[in-house]
Image: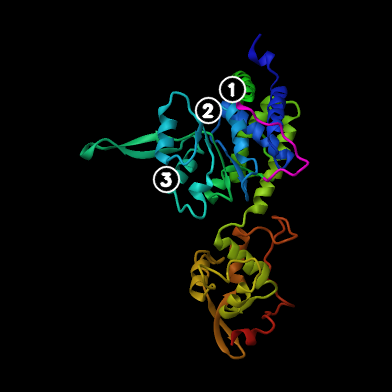
Amino acid sequence: MTAQQTIDGAALLDEIEAFHRRFNVFPTEAAFVAVTLWDAHTHLLDCFDSTPRLAFLSPEPASGKTRALEIVETLVPQPMVAVNASASALFRAVSGLEARPTILFDEIDTVFGPKAGENEQLRGFLNAGYRRIGVMYRCVGDGSNQQVQEFPSFCAVAVAGLGSLPDTILTRSVIIRMRRRARNEKVEPYRQRTNEAEGNALRKRLGEWADSVRERVQDAWPEMPPEVTDRPADVWEPLLAVADAAGGHWPARARAACLELVNAAKADDKGSIGIRLLTDLRDQVLSGIDRLPTVAVLDRLCSLDEAPWADMSGRPLDSRTLAKLLGEYMTGANTPIKARNIKTGGGVLKGYYAADLHDAWQRYCPPPPGESATSATSATSQVNGTEKVADGLHASAT
């Protein structure tokens, strides 16, 4: 009998999920589904154009991140545990070994945390390795005999750490927000001497099942939920392909988990500082107003609770920085957003028009609260066809 006949893919994924549940407490059911599918996709890596990063993140230590990586380690092919590994070591390991490793990077916050500074080479490796075509270029040789050599960097990567990650990595990741176990949440103690062998046995069976469905997965184009497009669709496509190959209840569970985790990631995403500025201007500063002098814009921004504008590197946002940030975006007439003259009772002041920001709001900002993406419109308005200026304008502008 063939492996496909003897191994039920759906039942095997059920067993892998149950193995995680013995030792891990994940925050949602969707997280168990996603991690199980991610484990399985590592055995079918050559079937996909991209491989999502798996990110276990938490605000505090002792939240189960390392244990999650330990269980993943028993289930994925060629696990390579990396702590503070350099980019050079990792890309040479990926390109130099006969079998592509699955990299498990614990304590990733020591590389990208707020006190760690930048680590562009490692960030570049993690970003490049997300795609099958991803490579790193290095000079190889001695002295004047050096030549540029291409090193493949495509491999599966799971990371764990405190806080967050650079946006370029987060957007390529399935994010599991870990938390400390509550008193009523119990797990089985993990004993490497006995439990590792159990995980390895599941790994072997998972590899055999993957071999039996490889051709089918290779040609698969899984149907994505309509709401999931662009980068999130790239992230989830391999996981949905695995779920479809397994069958049973996994295709439905996978798509439900996909929607839940993608929406959660969108809710967490505050965007760049520029998008945050555009959104605050739309929702808080220019809501219902068609123009406002710069001094009043700055005053309103800096008074917003839980906003960064009152403390930008030790001092409040000023007109020069505001102009620089907004100048990166274009008006509907395809010219940079900039301050223009505004006539007031006290004279003429420089300020910003909502009409100039409307195109950027439509392109970059999330929908206003209570509105869907398709019904989102400008937060500015005109009153009976006339222009409305903020109450108290003269007081704030003088």
Residue extending furthest toward the right = 184
- Distance between the alpha carbons at the discs numbered 1 and 2: 9 Å
Report x, y in % for residue 181. Answer: 71, 43
Q: Which of marks 2 and 3 is in front?
A: 3
Report x, y in % for residue 140. Answer: 30, 36
Earlier along the polypeptide chain: callout 1 or callout 2? 2
**Does 191 appear in magenta?**
yes
Marks 1 and 2 in Cβ contact (< 8 Å): yes
Q: What residue type is labelled 2?
A: Asp
Report x, y in % for residue 279. Answer: 63, 64
Q: Which amino acid does label 1 sit on?
A: Arg
Q: Mark 1 points at which residue?
A: 214
**In which image quadrant can residue 233 be found?**
top right
**In which image quadrant can residue 367 be found?**
bottom right
| Magenta-highlighted residues | 179-193
What secondary structure characterizes most of the magenta part?
A: loop
Residue extending furthest toward the left = 144
Image point (55%, 67%), residue name: 331
Rendered position, 311 above or below 340: above
* Residue 351 in view here: yes
Q: Which of marks 3 and 1 is in front?
A: 3
SS category of the residue bearing label 3: helix
Earlier along the polypeptide chain: callout 3 or callout 1? 3
